[in-house]
Amino acid sequence: MTEDWSKICRGFLYFFLLNAETVPNMTHILVIFFLSTTFMLSNEIKAEVPHKAHAPVTVEAANVSQFPVDLKERLEKEIAAKKPKSGTAKFFYLFGVENEKNSADQSHTFANFVSIDSKGIQKWHSISWLPLGYREKRELDVFKNFGEALKAEIFDEHAPAVDGENFELADTLQFAREAGLKLGVWGPLEITDEFFELGERRSKFLAPQDLKDPKKNITPSVQYKAVDKKSRRFGEAFNCMRAVSDLAGYDFKMGSGGPLFSEWGIWGFKGTQAVLDHLAKKREQWFVSNPKLAKPRTSF
């Protein structure tokens, strides 16, 4: 019982500090205390070992996804229709995938920066940041429920950073189809040269070597980490969402729509929308098209 109360007190202190600027009165603080107590005592989970979730890669699952196999080719045709009469036009696609429950281990945010010149020549630069070896293992070190995540936050027991790998759009779409995930596509949004160049540099930074050699498609200077609040500040590791959002600065916040005003559940489509909102708010000048009007396409 003493150990439980110790956990309760630490949980209360954590949420008090976390919400010091947003909680308006003592009533709300007491609600936070009650809910944090409930979550901590009702989730008997071993926080020592984060849950390793495996994407269900099966032939049956591949038939569930609602987007076509040739989606990449369709997007290329979509860009081809925007060929400029002179010069080069630049565009931005943002993608989000999730399953029916929007599970953390089945969600992903990724982006593509595309250019097309007056001759119709296209160049695509992908930011799709996942753990190294995801192509073979299809697993993420994430927590399977809020209680487990809360305990890890309080006791600082998050999964460690691992080597990361940046994937091309066709590969990422294939992963999503094989796992039977839903896809949302924001764009194409016309963007400025500045934003395009930043995206191109980030893409090359995450995959700086010869792509013909898979072992070189890794950057040793940064890693992947699903819970990256501390590591990303020092450029050590970040997750898929912040691989894109941090182009506009390191103050991206996923939101507070989860339990106890937390970021829990702000991934998949919600997380991807949060990334776009952040980019639009911080760097509206990067967009020629109005990003605030962009809505995800979920059927193709």
Image (cartoon, helix red, strand yellow):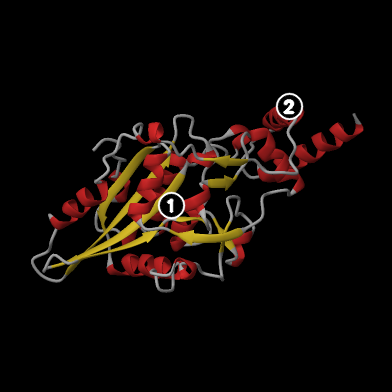
Q: Secondary structure at mark 1?
A: helix
Q: Quadrant of residue 127?
A: bottom left
Residue found at the far bottom of this picture: 209
Q: Position of residue 158 (x, y in %)?
A: 68, 49
**Crowd class of label 2 (few under 14; some 14 to 19; many from 20; radius 10 Å):** few
Q: Quadrant of the N terminus?
A: top right
Q: Nearer the viewer, residue 241 or 10?
A: 241
- Name the residue at 64% across, 40% down: 51
Q: Which residue is mark 1?
A: 278
The answer to whether residue 16 shows anywhere in this view is no
Picture disc at residue 229: none
Q: Nearer the viewer, residue 215 or 88?
A: 215
Q: Position of residue 97 (x, y in %)?
A: 41, 41
Q: Which residue is mark 2?
A: 34
The answer to whether residue 284 shows anywhere in this view is yes
Query: In screen coordinates, is 237 left or right of 148?
Result: left
